[in-house]
Structures are given as structure tokens and as C-alpha cells.
Image (cartoon, rainbow, N blue to C red):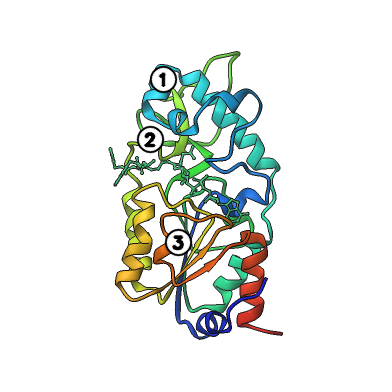
Amino acid sequence: MTIPQSLAGAIARARSVAVLTGAGVSAESGVPTFRDAQTGLWAQFDPQKLATPDAFRRNPKLVWDWYAWRRKLVAKAEPNAGHRALAVLEGRVSDFALITQNVDGLHRRAGSRNVVELHGNIGRVKCSRENTIVEHWTEVGDEVPRCAGCGALLRPDVVWFEETLPPDALQAAEDAARRCQILLVVGTSAEVYPAAALPAYAKSAGATIVEINPNPTPLSDAADYVLRAPAGAVLPALVAAAWPV
Ligand code: BV8
């Protein structure tokens, strides 16, 4: 993967870098992206129709089982070279922020520390009424487990469509987008808001926008650099080009 010298030099000199990742950065870890066709039992379902409060209200068991299936997939997945390169990059840049739309926790498992999880984390479960995080729960037969405190159904601690993002996370992401000199946008179809608005904030603040994605997205035309290849190949090459050994 050849990295333009001008980009490698800009990365090496940058004081402040932000990264926005989507499901594509976990694709090479075997975690299906949101728009990949789902497999097996879930092939018949559209994730955007399942990841909603209404779906959970109408059929809590179906939604609970979908997340249990994805949780098992994520537990078996390992961070890939792209995740690891971002952890290395964090150590090389004085002001670094990793903003992710992913709920799989793979950035932290790869060693990234300043991770802003815009859409929550599939590994966490909370009470659907009190929003308190529940560490342990018992699954009784086919029932969706309930909160020991108030009896309400438990649910994954993720942000569904039509739900607002955690205000602190969104604020941290917007601040990072506005202050960075370079924004890497990796593995996202750039269609889900308000995350998809972040590159515009960075661009209007004068940042260099770099899209890393094998496919075009609505962001491609606005990007200063478009690296049309998988994140697992591009990100390690970017770090190697910026800091040649
Ligand atoms: C909200 C958690 C206020 C759950 C997810 C304008 C402003 C504000 C809101 C809206 C708006 N317009 C519409 C909305 C509503 C909605 C929205 O954006 N809809 C879209 C579909 C138009 N937004 C919301 O509802 C948000 N809430 O704004 O609250 C509000 C309140 C009421 C009414 C309206 C607004 C909440 C959004 C969060 C939803 N939750 N996830 C879960 O995971 O189960 S989003 C979910 O989809 C994922 O988390 C992910 O973030 C997103 C999918 O996006 P990607 O990550 O980009 O994944 P995708 O599969 O699409 O693309 C993968 C890309 O990777 C592809 O481009 C592919 O080419 C690339 N790729 C593949 N392989 C590789 C690769 N790239 C690199 N390397 C590879 N190897």
C-alpha cells in the first residue's frame, strides 16, 4: 500500500489527530459490518430495523437474541492490524482522539486508550428502565432477563436508532473533530448521524480529511486523501510511512 509522501509527512508533523471509525475497521476481525448481509438465522433481518426501541418493545426476545449472537461473535474476534496501528498512532501523537461508532470494544482490546464510544458497547447490559449497568444476569429459559431491582427487561447498552447519543461522548467527539489537524475516517459508510457530521466539523475547522475505505461513500468527494483499500493494510502502512524505522 503506497502512502502519499505529503500525507506521511503531515501525520509525522501533526500535533493533533482524530480518527472516526465504523464497522469496516472490524471487518478483517470477522465482525460483519452493519451493511454486510447478516448470516444464518439473522440473514432475513435488516439491522436497522432490529436496532430500534420499537423492535425491542414489539419483540424483546428477538432483539435480545440478536445481540447475544453478536456478543458471541465479538467475543471470538481479535483486534486486527488496523486496530493495532491506531493504538501505535495514539502513542506517537500528542493530542489524539479515537472516535468509534463500533460497539465491539476491539479498539480498547488493541490497546487504544482515549476511545470515545459514540454508540455504546455490546459487552455492557443495562436495565431498560433505570439505565443502570448490570454486570451479571441469569437467563431463565426463553425469557429476556429482568432487572433484579425493578423487574424491567434488561437490554444492551448501545444507542439504537432514534435514541440520542451519550451527551459527553458526542461533545468529546465534536471537540476532537474541531481541534484536530488531520481526521482519518476509517471503515464507515458515513450515513449514520450525528457521527457522519463530524468530518464536516473537522473540514470547516481546516483539518485534512483522509478517507480509508475500499468503497466510495458520501464523504469521498470532500476528502483531501482517499485511500481505497482495507484498513488492515492502510493503517499499518500509514504509521510505517510517517515514522520509517
Ligand atoms: C439520533 C448501535 C437524535 C446499535 C448504531 C440527522 C441528524 C440526526 C439524526 C438523524 C439524522 N438523519 C437521520 C437521523 C436518524 C438516524 C440516522 O442517522 N439514520 C440514518 C440511517 C439516516 N440517527 C439516529 O437515530 C441516531 N440518533 O440522532 O438521535 C434523534 C432522535 C429521534 C429522531 C431522530 C434523531 C442514533 C444513531 C446510532 C444508531 N446505532 N449502532 C448496534 O450496533 O446494534 S449505528 C450502526 O450503524 C453502527 O453502530 C454503525 O455506526 C452504523 C453503521 O455504520 P458503519 O459503521 O459505517 O457501518 P456500515 O456497515 O454502514 O459501513 C461499513 C463501511 O466499511 C462500508 O463503507 C465499507 O465499504 C467499509 N469497509 C468494509 N470492509 C472494510 C471497510 N473499510 C475499511 N477496511 C475494511 N476492511
Mark 1, residues whose alpha carbon is within 10 Å: few (<14), some, or many (≥20)? few
Upstream in sequence: badge 1 or badge 2: 2
Upstream in sequence: badge 1 or badge 3: 1
Tag shown at residue 220? 3
Q: Quadrant of ligand 1?
A: top left
Which quadrant holds the N terminus? bottom right
Tag shown at residue 131? 2
Distance CA(mark 3)–CA(mark 2): 37 Å
Q: Position of residue 207 (x, y in %)?
A: 38, 74
Q: Secondary structure at mark 3?
A: helix
172 or 145, which is in the foreground?
172
Residue type indicated by callout 2 = Asn
As drawn, 122 above or below 193: above
Q: Secondary structure at mark 2?
A: loop
Residue at 63% x, 83% y is 243
Residue type indicated by callout 1 = Gly
